[in-house]
Amino acid sequence: MSLLAKLHIKSCHLIVVVSLFLISFLLVFFSRYNRLETDNALIPGAQTLLLHDDGELRDLIPLLQHSEFEFDVKNYEWALQVYGYQSFRAGRYEINEPISFIDFFFKLSQGLQDPFNVVISSGMEQDRLIQRVASRFRFSAQDLSAAMNDSTLLSEIMVEAPQLIGRMIPNTYEMYWTTSARQFILRMMQEFDKAVLIPYSERAEELGMTIDQITTLASIIEWEVRHVDEKPRVSGLYWNRLNRRMRLQADPTVAYAIGVRRRLQYSDYRVAHPYNTYRINGLPPGPLNNPRLTSIQAALYPEDHNYLFMVATPEGYHAFTTNYQDHLRESRKWTNWLREQQRIRERMEAEAKTDANAQQSAANP
């Protein structure tokens, strides 16, 4: 065989080998590339990622594994090289269904976090509200407490620190997890302005009250009244006392002063505290809690009547009277009912204890 023929055969072999190599390489390349492009590259376990700080996408691998995401680590690392993404931004990200690498990287690198609903419950004292709210955000309770006492911020929103709690209108709000404590307060003030300040400022002026005095009265109503339909009547009673320069003598202010929600004792009413309306004249210095809009509206539009006294009833409402003698009579009814309930509880506890002793004796003859 001639040298030329041998060279031809070798070149053919080389072409075949190179062709096979290229075909194999392309098959592997496109196979891996298709795995990068698939919408199932990352299958979520935990559906919410909370990333407290900015960082590198490569460093997320242990967190994703701990959160039970299903994915190929080598493909993840290769995808970072192919697509050129490097870092992510802090945030709250919902991954509710399988996602491609490029969509995942884009979402986190651009900080396209998902909002969530923040429920602001009604009737919360400031410390409880701070703890409840801070548990939902990245900021801490200490951060929120500091912001609520920040003189610069308070000057900006033109609200004094004791009044701030009364402006935290209960509702459900859509917010972002990385919202700062300052941003949260500014958002709540915007919501208060829309719900109360803008529509009701003129009405408050007609009554000779500031908006903050209205929210203070509303906070007492919020604490005192269980049923919405009774709020205007209770408001009317407090207005009657204020107009006659009587002390409000509102039990919620005493409970606030002693820091405990329980049945009050006679000694509680004597506690020296700036919020105890059994010892001070007029309204307390600020709201006890964050009242609902219905309580604020009741404070603004009280029922017109002559009632000056009220006492609770077993049905959860109040018995209203115009004079002290009638009030004493209604108070005795309430006290007798409470005593009867106490006797019933004690009897039931005694019977339960007797039954437990009998069962123990039968089990251990």
Image (cartoon, helix red, strand yellow):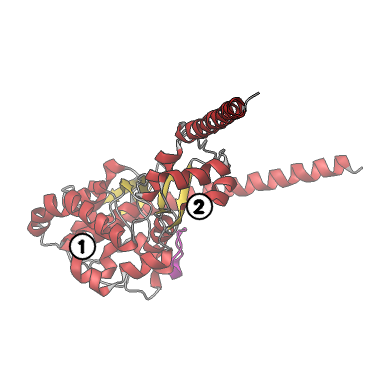
95 w.r.t. 262: above or below: above
- The residue that mark 2 highlights is 58
Q: Earlier in the sequence, mark 2 or mark 1?
A: 2
Q: Residue at x 34, y 56 (%)?
A: 179
Residue 264 shown in magenta: yes
> Which quadrant, please, contains the N terminus?
top right
Residue furthest toward the right? Answer: 365
Question: Is residue 186 visible from the viewing direction of this image?
Answer: yes
| Element carrying mark 1 | helix
Q: Label 2 sits on what residue type?
A: Arg
Magenta-colored span: 259-268
Question: x, y percentage for residue 358?
Answer: 81, 42
Q: Nearer the viewer, residue 246 or 331?
A: 246
Residue 329 shown in magenta: no
Question: Is residue 336 visible from the viewing direction of this image?
Answer: no
Q: Residue at x 21, y 49 (%)?
A: 298
Q: Quadrant of residue 204?
A: bottom left
Q: Nearer the viewer, residue 264 or 60?
A: 60
**Direction from residue 75 to residue 282 in the image, left or right:** left
Q: CA distance from mark 2 to mark 1?
A: 51 Å
Between tags 2 and 1, which lies in front? 2
- Label 2: how many Cα within 10 Å (few below 14, some 14–19, many 20+): some
- Label 1: how many Cα within 10 Å (few below 14, some 14–19, many 20+): many
Question: x, y percentage for residue 345?
Answer: 59, 47
- The residue that mark 1 highlights is 212
